[in-house]
Image: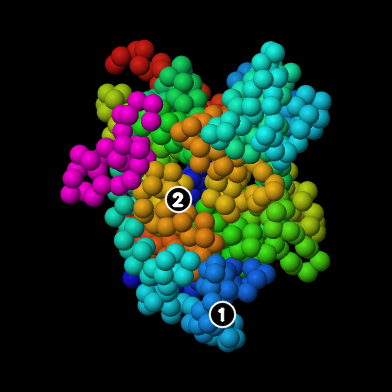
């Protein structure tokens, strides 16, 4: 077990390193303009550009540049010049409560609906309910966030002022907090709910053919009990895996569109803001942190699985 | 997938969880193998493709979706016809100070307040069919058709790029194994570790600044090829990984062993023996990939990291329209609905295609019949 964990961790560190190099290359080698002038922002004085050049190491060789920039980002010293000279890492930290509120609420909604719809369409596979749920799920998967968000914003916050239009209220005022977040939660959850119900349906249909389900029936358990206890529980494994990953992505700054549409000033909103100003350092930092978060999350999920299921760690060490 | 189609996967412990795409679309990794088995005596039975075709023809909803998709494609391809013969204007032509004669009335295209004219349908002879787009007074319908060309181009060409890359990489790493496999798999791991949207944004914004200069390839920053390439590359691991898994399973089969024993070359085994067995998976992935690509394009363009002006797409139209959401919601809703309809039609068709190509659905139906029988006879 320990050997598996250590190997998995070493692998994760290698991936983390590769990610940081890749992001560095994307932002420092790909663009065909002077990076220092770009970082310094519009209307920068020549002196500022010189300072930026020194700070970000553009006067040095590429490996040194990489080292300088990573040091800036990871020690929390990176400043965004285009965005009112804010400290990038601090801004990301400040955005986490908003992003987390958005993601956790949305996750509860999408898990509840995804599992409910997946379950009823699997136990009625091929029937009318199944076909109906399939269509609804496919609409959910195909729905662009902005479409739903603009309909919500126009009809529910402007035409009938049922909800506040945008913004974020801290959790210290739970009613306002929830009222401000309901629309973004739904917008974000629709896609995943549709997707998870499809995954659960196909996973349940697979599990229904297993021997232990037949055994459970043979020993006379009720249909309901077989479905809930034996089929559903075993079908949830892919959902758990997917959930870990999707949630990691969203927390790592993935809910950019939802956050910017609803003016929730979380990590994703910061990315959208930085994009408007083409502020490379901010996007670079969020991308690196986001990817790091996902890799760590995956590693933890993998190790947890290996701990829970010996087949996995044996399988991996044999490979 | 999906809009915020941030999908991630990992070296997942469960076969169905190897990746969101794989799991979600429920592509059974052994589906192709069963098709193979049927193909053994397939000549008499009509062949697996004929069977799949028959199944697909019975799925009216899927066929209807395909028809809708083709209709949208044809409309967008005919954009110049509409622009030149009906609307008499181009997608970027402004009509700020012009007046429009509608049923004998004279209306301003853009009111002094900045509010643009609403949908005129055929009242002005097809001009401003869907109204004008905000203070620039461009014809929304013409823009919609031209924007659709960009969106569809990116969706389809990026899917081709993804498929080409994924099949090549999947075949190389799945068939050769060893160092080749390790090398390719690690690169895929790294790309896989990014949230799709963030990687797309990073590449998009880096390339939007100065265009792409790579050896002989020279792309301007406004070129449609930039978002196309980015989207094509970003989704590659989501297709390459499941394909590799399927190849690993196929490699252990007797027919590959037989081919090796006969002295077949690597290339022959890869392209003549393996590839046909992967075809049904590839087709389904390709179809659903188009839908995902179009959503990612819209997201990137909305954020300013996709299609760059003066080119436009449905994503950039939403981005422009959203600024005037409360005065003219139609400018956001029209391109949004266009994306929704197109993506939905592709997704429904892809779903039907998967059902048709996946013989397991038959097995499932029998399993269900079994449960139904049990429920009818209470014990």
- What's the chain of the residue with tag 2? A
Residue A225: quarter of image: top left
* Rendered residue at 64%/29% (across/down): B109
Location of residue B101 with respect to B289 vertically, above or below: above
User: Mark 2 highlights which residue?
Assistant: A256
Location of residue A127 with respect to A263 vertically, above or below: above
Residue A38 visible within the image: yes
* Rendered residue at 18%/45% (across/down): A173
* Rendered residue at 78%/63% (across/down): B217
Side of A12 relative to B149 (left or right): left
Asked if residue A165 is among those painted magenta in the image, a careful observer would answer yes
Q: Residue B201 at x, y = what percent?
A: 55, 56
Location of residue B246 with respect to B74 vertically, above or below: below
Asked if residue B278 is among those painted magenta in the image, a careful observer would answer no
Residue A212: quarter of image: top left
Which one is nearer the viewer's eye here, B55 or B106? Answer: B106
Q: Which label number is shown at residue A46?
A: 1
Q: How is the image coloured?
A: rainbow
Q: Secondary structure at mark 1?
A: helix
Going from the N terminus, do you reach mark 1 or mark 2 first?
1
Q: Secondary structure at mark 2?
A: helix
Residue range (magenta):
A158-185
Side of B310 relative to A7 (left or right): right
Q: Residue A10 at x, y = what percent?
A: 43, 73
């Amino acid at each position: 077990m320990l050997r598996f964990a250590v190997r998995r961790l070493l692998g994760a560190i290698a991936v983390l390193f590769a990610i940081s190099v890749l992001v560095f290359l994307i932002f420092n080698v790909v663009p065909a303009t002077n990076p220092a002038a770009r970082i310094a922002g519009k209307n920068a004085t020549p002196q500022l550009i010189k300072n930026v050049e020194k700070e970000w190491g553009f006067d040095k060789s590429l490996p040194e540049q990489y080292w300088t920039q990573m040091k800036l980002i990871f020690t929390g010293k990176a400043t965004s010049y285009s965005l009112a000279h804010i400290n990038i890492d601090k801004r990301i930290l400040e955005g986490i409560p908003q992003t987390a509120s958005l993601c956790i609420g949305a996750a509860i909604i999408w898990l509840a609906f995804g599992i409910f719809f997946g379950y009823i369409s699997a136990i009625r596979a091929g029937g009318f309910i199944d076909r109906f749920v399939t269509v609804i799920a496919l609409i959910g998967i195909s729905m662009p966030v902005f479409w739903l968000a603009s309909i919500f914003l126009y009809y529910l916050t402007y035409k009938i002022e049922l909800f506040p239009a945008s913004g974020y209220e801290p959790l210290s005022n739970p009613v306002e907090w929830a009222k401000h977040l309901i629309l973004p939660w739904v917008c974000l959850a629709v896609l995943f709910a549709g997707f998870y119900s499809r995954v659960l349906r196909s996973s349940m249909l697979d599990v229904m053919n297993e021997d232990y389900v037949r055994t459970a029936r043979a020993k006379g358990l009720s249909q309901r009990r077989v479905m809930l206890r034996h089929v559903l529980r075993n079908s949830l494994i892919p959902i758990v895996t997917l959930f870990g990953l999707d949630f990691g992505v969203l927390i790592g700054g993935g809910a950019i569109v939802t956050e910017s549409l609803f003016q929730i000033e979380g990590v994703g909103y910061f990315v959208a803001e930085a994009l408007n100003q083409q502020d490379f350092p901010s996007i670079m930092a969020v991308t690196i942190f986001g990817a790091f978060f996902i890799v760590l999350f995956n590693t933890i999920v993998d190790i947890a699985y290996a701990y829970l299921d010996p087949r996995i760690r044996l399988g991996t060490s044999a490979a | 997938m999906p809009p915020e189609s941030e999908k991630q996967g990992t070296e997942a412990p469960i076969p169905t969880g190897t990746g969101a795409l794989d799991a979600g679309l429920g592509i059974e990794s052994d589906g192709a193998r069963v098709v193979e088995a049927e193909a053994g005596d397939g000549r008499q039975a009509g062949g697996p493709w004929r069977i799949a075709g028959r199944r697909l023809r019975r799925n009216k909803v899927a066929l209807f979706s395909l028809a809708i998709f083709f209709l949208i494609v044809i409309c967008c391809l005919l954009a110049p016809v509409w622009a030149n013969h009906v609307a008499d204007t181009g997608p970027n032509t402004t009509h700020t100070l012009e007046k429009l004669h509608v049923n004998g009335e004279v209306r301003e295209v853009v009111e002094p307040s900045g509010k643009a004219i609403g949908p005129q349908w055929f009242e002005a002879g097809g001009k401003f069919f869907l109204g004008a787009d905000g203070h620039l007074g461009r014809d929304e319908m013409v823009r919609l058709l031209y924007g659709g060309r960009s969106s569809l181009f990116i969706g389809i060409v990026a899917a081709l790029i993804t498929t080409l890359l994924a099949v090549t990489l999947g075949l190389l790493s799945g068939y050769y194994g060893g160092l080749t496999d390790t090398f390719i798999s690690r690169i895929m791991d790294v790309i896989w570790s990014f949230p799709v949207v963030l990687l797309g944004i990073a590449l998009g914004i880096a390339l939007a600044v100065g265009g792409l200069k790579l050896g002989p390839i020279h792309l301007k920053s406004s070129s449609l090829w930039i978002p196309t390439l980015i989207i094509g590359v970003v989704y590659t691991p989501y297709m390459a990984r499941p394909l590799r898994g399927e190849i690993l399973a196929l490699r252990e089969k007797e027919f590959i062993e037989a081919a090796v024993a006969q002295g077949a070359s690597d290339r022959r085994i890869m392209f003549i023996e393996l590839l046909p067995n992967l075809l049904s998976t590839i087709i389904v992935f390709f179809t659903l990939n188009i839908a995902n690509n179009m959503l990612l394009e819209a997201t990137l363009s909305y954020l300013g990291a996709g299609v760059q002006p003066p080119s436009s797409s449905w994503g950039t139209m939403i981005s422009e329209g959203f600024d005037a959401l409360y005065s003219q919601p139609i400018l956001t809703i029209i391109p949004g609905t266009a994306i929704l309809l197109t993506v939905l039609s592709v997704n429904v068709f892809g779903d039907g295609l998967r059902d048709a190509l996946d013989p397991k659905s038959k097995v499932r139906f029998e399993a269900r019949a079994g449960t139904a029988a049990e429920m009818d006879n209470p014990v």
